[in-house]
Image: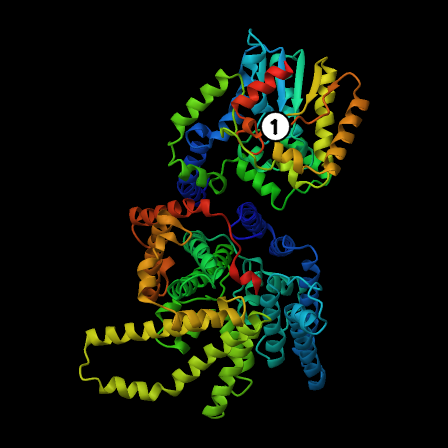
């Protein structure tokens, strides 16, 4: 059941209304209702997936109880930690890599399994619980219902944000009464998410798919354009899911981590990764980078740790070399950025004029350069294979001619004039929203405090643009594939 | 009612207002934006349910029936009506006849023509939904039967939400068509078409080429593999006609020379067996078993007779 489906439009209000009605009577009943809704939602993707979700929940619940219980010896707690991590990671590796294994080792491409949607997300979430209870950062949750709710919380279940147990789990302890202010803020966030998905991401997908589906026949200029479009598509697609999830959680009275913070305003690669898929990057920092030594053991070790994190991140995204290369290249850009930081600072300091205008120019240059590096790595992410990625690079860097730019109209890229203008208008509005978010830190709050007439003007522009995008048809969120 | 609830309801109505307006437009002004094909569905539906014209003979079937028999050439008193629909299967025709009997009473005679491949495929189900041809109770019955026969076409993924979207005229299903018409752009064209089809008492051309040598749909079926749900509704249709004392004739519309050469013998044999079983099951009905072949010049496209072909076929049969 996609967030952008009719089914969800029925399911979501029903869950919310009954949830708050039950909260008035009994918190326990409301939690049980939410858990039923979570499993129903998940099992819409496949009934058998429910068993997997329950299995992961049960195993990590037991491991957490041992890990966090000091009456057990250190050895037992250590064993439970290893067991919890091994079971979860093995499960993930099995589902992610089985098809590759059957193709490469068993030589039987027909032997395939379906990747259960969301498995990468809830496995990572439940791992935070096991590890944090072992570390003593998280109290043991004895109530299985609450723990199961943490793992299967439906707004974040399928594509994150990957919540740490320390953040989400305690929120199930207290009852959540309906709060109009929170609901309004949550609904604005959801509306922004839907806007990004329906107005921008789904339109960009048409052009990007068209061009990347014909890599051999299109010019380098079009491939460059498609890759830039893809950067915006994946941002709008993934950030939209996160925004809807976060908004939905807010309506229900919960607070979940923000997954994106205007990533294309980043001034450096490391800044970008602090703004992009924040929950996954935090996860890797907390549970991989820091345990490996982080930056505490010298620069070489730090760079190796960064590369390890990004390589793992690539592997997490999929069982294909091009994802690993995407991760490694992203890591390499970050390491290079860190290594050249001093030199760049010296160049900047040596610049003859320092005033407000040059500072803005400098910032714009940094943002542009960061975006360029992001787009370069993204070729590996979007390509269907490593070979295709190199074909794309070949065409962009060696096969691009100025005449290509004149030869191709952006209105001929699968969308037509109307939809392309619609898309551009949507992107302009998104930039304005992101600028407000960058300045204020809470664009939804900013909008909700505007005068009524202005607020409703904004709402109506969004509603009409979303409604007008219904003709495009609902497309799955990209991160469901991961 | 608390202030919060009042405020929420007010905001909800304000938020939903554009959607409601769009849905109302979609539901109330279909002729202003729908395709020409819809006009035929609408004409048939309005004739069956609302017209007061008395009919002695009905022509039933799919687009081949619609484009093959011209009522005006068959009678002089306006008592024959072609209620076939392009893309229809026995499912739609069963309910058309049922409604016709409710509103007009039973006709004396019925001529049934379905393309043979329409017993194998429900290839136009989306059109049935898109045109909102069946009522809620009728479509519920179809879904029940589709469950019984495990029909994957009617019960494709997301059938329920699809049905809901079509039934509620939601923009995810209709907005593309509305854009295509620029909201009101097709009104005049569709009204003219509607008048024309009414004037022809349901007859309608599907292709207007002066000749066509393309392959008909049957060519793409190696064997005659009938769909149990379609057969069930065909049985229901014949049963309904029989129960109401209607004289039934099952005819075959012609195929062009190209298709005649390419349709496999296995397919022909399968179809012949199907017709033979019908004959055995309903001895009172007349079944024309041979699929006639006309020269390519009589075809308006690869499946349908042009006007010249329809005139020839009508005169030969009546």
User: On the rendered image, what quadrant is the C terminus of chain A found in?
Assistant: bottom right
**Closest to the observer: B317 or A9?**
B317
Give the residue drawn at x 41%, y 48%.
Answer: A466
Up-down relation of residue B178 to residue A108 (above or below): above
Q: Quadrant of residue B279?
A: top right
Q: Quadrant of residue A128?
A: bottom right
Residue B196 horizontal side relative to residue A80, left or right: left
Q: How is the image coloured?
A: rainbow
Give the residue drawn at x 66%, y 18%.
Answer: B111
**Closest to the observer: B177 or A165?**
B177
**Closest to the observer: A386 or A246?**
A386
Image coordinates for residue B69, horizontal then vertical, percent: 58, 19
Q: Which residue is mark 1?
A: B62
Give the residue drawn at x 47%, y 87%.
Answer: A303
**Closest to the observer: B127 or A143?**
B127
Q: Chain of mark 1?
A: B
Residue A163 horizontal side relative to residue B285, left or right: left
Image coordinates for residue A123, horizontal then vertical, percent: 62, 69
Give the residue drawn at x 45%, y 35%.
Answer: B23
Up-down relation of residue B150 to residue B59 (above or below): below
Residue B59 appears anywhere in the view:
yes
Image coordinates for residue A52, horizontal then vertical, percent: 69, 63
């Amino acid at each position: 059941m996609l967030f952008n489906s009719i089914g969800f439009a029925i399911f979501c209000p029903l869950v919310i209304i009954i949830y708050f009605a039950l909260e008035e009577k009994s918190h326990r009943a409301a939690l049980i209702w939410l858990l039923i809704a979570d499993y129903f939602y998940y099992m819409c993707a496949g009934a058998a997936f429910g068993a997997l979700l329950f299995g992961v929940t049960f195993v990590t619940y037991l491991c957490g109880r041992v890990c966090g219980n000091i009456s057990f010896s250190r050895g037992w707690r250590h064993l439970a930690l290893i067991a919890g991590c091994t079971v979860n990671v093995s499960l993930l590796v099995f589902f992610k890599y089985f098809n590759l294994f059957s193709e490469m080792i068993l030589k039987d491409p027909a032997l395939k399994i379906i990747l259960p949607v969301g498995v990468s997300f809830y496995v990572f979430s439940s791992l935070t619980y096991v590890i944090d209870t072992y570390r003593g950062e998280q109290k043991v949750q004895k109530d299985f219902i609450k723990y199961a709710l943490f793992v299967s919380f439906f707004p974040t279940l399928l594509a994150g944000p990957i919540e740490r147990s320390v953040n989400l789990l305690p929120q199930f302890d207290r009852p959540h009464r309906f709060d109009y202010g929170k609901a309004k803020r949550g609904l604005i966030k959801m509306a922004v998410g839907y806007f990004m998905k329906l107005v921008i991401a789904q339109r960009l997908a048409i052009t990007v798919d068209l061009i990347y589906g014909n890599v051999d026949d299109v010019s380098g200029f079009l491939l460059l354009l498609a890759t830039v479009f893809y950067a915006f598509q994946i941002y709008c697609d993934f950030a939209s899911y996160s925004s809807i999830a976060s908004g939905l959680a807010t309506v229900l009275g919960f607070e979940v981590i923000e997954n994106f913070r205007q990533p294309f305003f980043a001034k450096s690669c490391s800044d970008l990764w602090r703004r992009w898929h924040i929950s996954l990057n935090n996860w890797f920092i907390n549970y991989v980078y820091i345990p490996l030594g982080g930056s505490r053991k010298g620069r070489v070790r730090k760079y190796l740790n960064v590369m390890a994190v990004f390589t793992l991140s690539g592997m997490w995204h999929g069982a294909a070399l091009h994802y690993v290369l995407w991760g490694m290249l992203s890591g390499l850009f970050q390491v290079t950025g860190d290594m050249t930081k001093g030199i760049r600072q010296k160049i900047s300091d040596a610049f003859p004029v320092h005033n407000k205008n040059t500072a803005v120019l400098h910032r714009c240059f940094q943002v542009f350069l960061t975006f360029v590096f992001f787009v370069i790595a993204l070729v590996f992410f979007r390509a269907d294979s490593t070979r295709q990625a190199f074909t794309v690079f070949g065409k962009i860097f060696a096969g691009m001619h100025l005449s290509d730019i004149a030869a191709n109209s952006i209105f001929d890229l699968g969308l037509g004039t109307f939809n392309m203008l619609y898309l551009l208008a949507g992107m302009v509005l998104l930039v304005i929203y992101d600028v407000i978010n960058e300045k204020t830190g809470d664009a939804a709050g900013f909008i909700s405090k505007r005068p009524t007439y202005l607020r409703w003007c904004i709402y109506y522009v969004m509603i009409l643009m979303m409604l007008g995008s219904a003709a495009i048809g609902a497309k799955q969120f990209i991160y469901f594939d991961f | 009612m608390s202030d919060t609830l009042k405020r929420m309801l007010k905001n909800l109505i304000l938020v939903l207002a554009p959607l409601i307006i769009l849905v109302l437009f979609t539901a109330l002004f279909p002729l202003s934006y729908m395709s020409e094909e819809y006009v035929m569905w609408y004409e048939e539906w309005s004739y069956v349910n609302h017209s007061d014209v008395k009919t002695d003979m009905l022509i039933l079937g799919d687009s081949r029936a619609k484009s093959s028999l011209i009522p005006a050439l068959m009678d002089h008193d306006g008592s024959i009506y072609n209620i076939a629909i392009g893309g229809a299967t026995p499912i739609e025709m069963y309910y058309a006849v049922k409604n016709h009997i409710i509103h007009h009473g039973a006709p004396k005679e019925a001529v049934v023509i379905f393309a043979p491949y329409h017993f194998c495929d429900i290839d136009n189900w989306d059109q049935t939904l898109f045109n909102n041809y069946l009522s809620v109770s009728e479509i519920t019955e179809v879904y029940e039967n589709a469950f019984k026969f495990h029909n994957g076409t009617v019960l494709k993924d997301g059938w329920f939400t699809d049905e809901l979207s079509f039934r509620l005229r939601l923009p995810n299903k209709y907005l593309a068509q509305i854009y295509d018409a620029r909201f009101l752009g097709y009104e005049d064209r569709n009204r003219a078409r509607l008048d024309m089809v009414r004037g022809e008492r349901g007859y309608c051309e599907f292709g207007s080429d002066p000749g066509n040598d393309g392959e008909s749909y049957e060519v793409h079926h190696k064997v005659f593999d009938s769909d149990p749900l379609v057969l069930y509704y065909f049985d229901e249709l014949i049963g309904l006609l029989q129960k109401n004392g209607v004289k039934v004739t099952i005819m075959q519309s012609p195929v062009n020379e190209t298709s005649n050469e390419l349709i496999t013998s296995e397919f022909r044999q399968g179809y012949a067996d199907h017709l033979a079983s019908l004959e055995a099951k309903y001895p009172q009905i007349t079944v024309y078993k041979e699929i006639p072949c006309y020269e390519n010049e009589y075809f308006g496209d690869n499946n349908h007779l042009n006007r010249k072909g329809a005139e020839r076929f009508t005169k030969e049969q009546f």
